[in-house]
Every structure is written in C-alpha cells, then in structure tokens.
Image: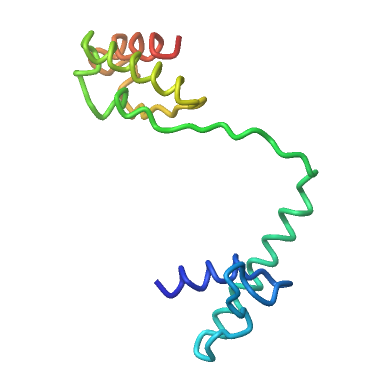
Amino acid sequence: MVWTLLSLALISCGRAQKTTADGVNCAAVPQEYRILYNELAAKLDHLGKGVKSQWKGKKAATAFGLKLLVASSNRGEVLLTDRVFKATVLTLDRLKSLGVRRVALSIQYPILSLSYQRSAEYSDFYKRVAQ
C-alpha cells in the first residue's frame, strides 16, 4: 500500500512540480519515507530520460487486445466441438465491434505436436479461428 501511494505521488508530483493537481505539496514527504521516495524518484527520472531519448514525438494509435479464453487449449477436447467454434467466432465478432484489434491465443505444448493425439484436429481448429 505504501509503495503504491509513493509511486502515485511520484508520478503525480513529478520532479519539476511543487504540488499535484489536487494541491498536495510534493516536498512534504514524511521523513520515514524520504530515502524510499528519493530512490523511486531517481529510478523514475532515469526511466523517463530513456523514454524521452527514444521517443520521436509521434503518437501511435492504440491497439486494444486481450487473451481469447474461449479458444484456450487448456479447455481440452471441448475445443473440437462445433459449439465452441461457433462461440469463438461470435466472441471474435463482438470483440471486433468493440474495437479490439488484437487477440492472444493460449496454445499449450504439446497440443500441436504430430505425436499428440488429435493434433491435426486442434491445428484445423486454430487455422479456422485465424481466418
């Protein structure tokens, strides 16, 4: 809890500002937290300089994404049913309408290995999902 509050205070205060947007005095860090505050401030300054040195000033569009749990290989052979395939397609359509542009699939080893029972069927399922 203390780490979270200090991190938030550092982010909201910044090194150049004297107060936060709420008018909280950044210099009023309790004595017992000053060493930690200074350590976190130094790390954040270092990270900030690294980001600024690599940033070219151009903002990119955000691509929202998520893990497609309905198609997770952890679900086992139920993935091979028509019902789950239809649910996966429906989920993808709904996510697309919400603006989601990326999905991650959880495909665990050895499900696609040639020696794995029904691996060709799992491979077919994921190929159909990707279309």
Quadrant containing the C terminus in the rendered view: top left
Residue at image position (45%, 25%) is 98
> In the image, residue 119 lies at what x, y percent?
29, 14
Observer-nearest residue: 41 or 12? 12
Q: Residue furthest bottom?
A: 31
Quadrant containing the N terminus in the rendered view: bottom left
Residue at image position (53%, 67%) is 8
Give the answer, above or below, for where 85 lies relative to 59: above
> In the image, residue 49 lies at what x, y percent?
74, 60
Residue at image position (32%, 22%) is 71
Give the answer, above or below, for where 40 lies relative to 71: below
> In the image, residue 109 lies at what x, y percent?
34, 28
Q: How is the image coloured?
A: rainbow
Give the answer, above or below, for where 59 lies relative to 101: below
Give the number of marks.
Answer: 0
> In the image, residue 88 lies at what x, y percent?
32, 17
Residue 59 located left or right of residue 98: right
Observer-nearest residue: 104 or 76? 104
Give the answer, above or below, for where 31 lies relative to 93: below
Quarter where residue 107 is shown: top left
Residue 26 located left or right of residue 124: right
Residue 115 located left or right of residue 25: left
Quarter where residue 62 is shown: top right
